[in-house]
Image (cartoon, helix red, strand yellow):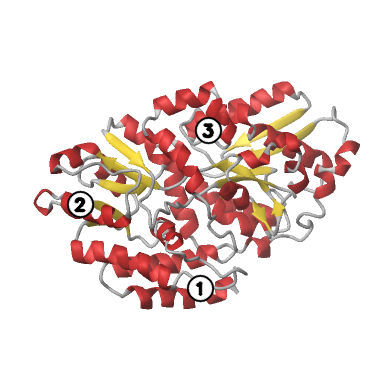
Amino acid sequence: MSHLLHRRRSALLAGVAAVALGLSACASGSGTTGTSSAPATTSASSTVDPKAPVTITWWTGQSAEAETILEGLAKEYMGLHPNITIKVAPGASTTDELKQKIAAGFVADNYPDLSYAFGSWATELGMSGKTLDLTAAVADPAVKWEEIPEAARKTAMVENRVIGAPALVDNLGLIYNKKVFDAAGVAYPSHDWSWDDFRAAAKKLTDSSKGIYGTAYSVSGSEDTTWHLWPQLWQNGGSILSADQKSATFNSDAGVKALDFWRAMAIDDKSVYLDQTDEKYPPLLYDGKVAMILGGPWLLYDLKDRKVSYGATRLPGTSGDHQTVSGPDVWVAFDHQDAARAKATTDFLLWLTSAPIDEKWNLAFGNLPLRSSERDSAAFATWAKDFAPGAQVFFDNLQNAKTPRPTVEGYTEMSKYVGEAISKVLQGQADSKSALDSAAAKSADALS
């Protein structure tokens, strides 16, 4: 599983489930977020000698194959800007270790100018006092910031400050194994399926004598457990947090209804494979032991590589609402109190996330494109063909990612409690209402 999409997924689950490191407490205090860095990237940039040598450090957080692509892009940029030197490195042995490395770097004053970060880290990094403020830079009409999905743009914002740019976007859809459906004589999922349709099909597809389940759900208690519940919460009219984002509201009637749905499938229907690891259920789909899963574009590479006869569509809906959840990751730009480095970092980041260059990165590597304008490119056509049928489905499904996951500092801890609650309910150890109420109560301190 060397491909970025699979490596990223494993790291995402570990990174989001980890206990927060308290990056703001690790900051030395020598920099101030936003105000100190804004002149370096905006008005004061005119005072920077455009030909003076500048060196910046970029931690990509990627595996070898992806790292090679990004090193090539850095080399291309340096060829266009001979005075700029970009030192490129993964930054850590796994992506989820980056946050700890960055925190340690704050203390030792040895942190990068640009780093990959999971979206769930955004608030902690943004509150560290060490990030650049790119708000004015992305407001330039030439940047075409609005081409990037709204949920991804919001993930790169902390307290109305833009601290970086989206690095990768994704979303959850429904992926199914056609051979399992054909063998059971069940019609393939339609674009307009409801959750009742999903449940009915899962019951028909489950065959205990053959060890086949209609669907699957992670019960590891990680973010993979948690974020699979959010689409139904939103479709039912609920929200994760209150309007001021200081208290949990996922334990509303909408949340209980969403969790009760999965409890009924797991306990009453016995149509759900409960994965204790987060890692088993996609391979079981490939092998025909699970008929359909809620998954994302990070699975497209394996589906193609394993030659799985599959289909994909948007999530089942509630009263016609097919809202999904997105998990964007971010390139975070850091402040070193150096106008030249700030300008070099900002200019490189805007170049890296422009449509022509993103085609050489995300589309070339099988990820969803960052920008809507890329759909008209030859690279997009090649990508959609190479990773059909799921590629176009997941790109179109970005429009159903209407609500961003919270990036407040307490989300990581709250997610752990929600994941634990879901796991208990699906394994028959608690009822939905009491489990979610308990998770909300445990989250109070983290969110206050």
How far apart are labels 3 and 2 at the CA level?
33 Å
Q: Nearer the viewer, residue 334 or 197?
A: 197
Which residue type carries mark 3?
Asn
The numbered mark, 3 or 2, whose residue comes first in the sequence reads: 2
The numbered mark, 2 or 1, whose residue comes first in the sequence reads: 2
The numbered mark, 3 or 1, whose residue comes first in the sequence reads: 3
- Report if the CB atoms under discs 3 and 2 are less than 8 Å apart: no
- In percent of the image, x 22 and y 66: which residue is there? 267
How far apart are labels 2 and 1 at the CA level?
33 Å
Label 2 environment density (alpha carbons within 10 Å; few <14, some 14–19, many ≥20): many
The answer to whether residue 134 is visible is yes
Task: Between label 2 and label 1, give the one nearer the viewer.
Answer: 2
Does dot 3 land on a helix, a strand or a loop? Answer: helix
Does dot 1 land on a helix, a strand or a loop? Answer: helix
Give residue 356's quadrant in the image: top right
Residue for badge 3: 362
Q: Nearer the viewer, residue 419 or 336?
A: 419
- In percent of the image, x 74 and y 37: which residue is there? 141
The answer to whether residue 117 is visible is no
- The disc at residue 227 is none
The spot of residue 148 in percent (x, y) is 60, 41
**In the picture provided, is 172 more to the left or to the right than 399?**
left
How far apart are labels 3 and 1 at the CA level?
35 Å
- In percent of the image, x 58 and y 47: which residue is there? 152
Label 1 environment density (alpha carbons within 10 Å; few <14, some 14–19, many ≥20): many
Residue for badge 2: 213
The spot of residue 352 in percent (x, y) is 64, 33
- The disc at residue 443 is 1
Which residue type carries mark 2?
Tyr
* 40 to 216, vertically: above or below: above
